[in-house]
Image (tube, grey):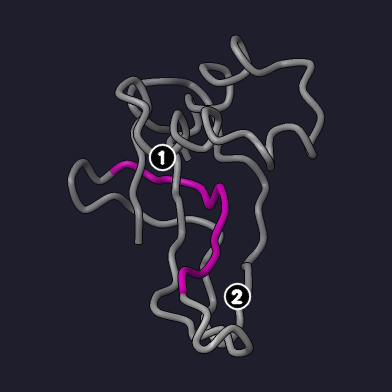
């Protein structure tokens, strides 16, 4: 599969199960008909009375294959742990103007 006129293939990604929701490894963007790969998924929720977490919504982040080389310019050399804890990295992935992405 190719995307955005690039000659990059989608990374090999598997389904991701988050609680009871399954996120497929790739989707077709309704805005551009480009295939996007699953970059990650999670939940948002709130603590109720300090002892119970209530899930409000599930989300998946799907990215164009060109996101990998674009992000690697700035973030190469960082460990997985550093990237997982980095708010600036998360913001760039989710809101990056140069990245084609889809939040589900």
Percent across and percent down for residue 16 are 63, 68
Residue 86: in magenta span = no
Residue sitting at 55 percent across and 21 percent down?
A: 71
Q: Secondary structure at mark 2?
A: strand
- Residue sitting at x 55%, y 40%: 10
Residue 94's disc number:
1
Q: Residue furthest front?
A: 49
Residue 39 falls within the magenta-colored stretch? yes
Give the residue drawn at x 63%, y 40%.
11
In the image shown, does 26 or 78 lie closer to the viewer? 78
Element assignment for label 1:
helix
Q: Residue at label 2? A: 18
The span shown in magenta is 34-45
Q: Could you say which is closer to the camera, residue 44 or residue 2? A: 44
Q: Is residue 34 left or right of residue 94?
A: left
Q: Evaluate if marks 2 and 1 touch, with contact meaning CB atoms under 8 Å apart.
A: no
Q: Residue 92 in the image: x percent, y percent?
A: 45, 28
Rendered view: 52 above or below 97: below
Magenta segment's dominant SS is: strand
Disc 2/disc 1 C-alpha distance (Å):
19 Å
């Amino acid at each position: 599969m190719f995307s955005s006129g690039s000659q990059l293939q989608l990374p090999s990604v598997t389904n991701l199960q988050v609680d009871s929701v399954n996120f497929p490894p790739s989707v077709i963007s309704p805005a551009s008909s480009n295939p996007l790969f699953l970059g990650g998924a999670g939940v948002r929720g709130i603590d109720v009375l300090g002892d119970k977490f209530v899930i409000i919504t599930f989300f998946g982040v799907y990215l164009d294959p060109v996101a990998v080389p674009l992000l690697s310019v700035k973030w190469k050399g960082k460990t997985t742990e550093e990237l997982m804890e980095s708010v600036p990295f998360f913001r760039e992935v989710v809101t990056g103007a140069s990245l084609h992405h889809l939040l589900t």
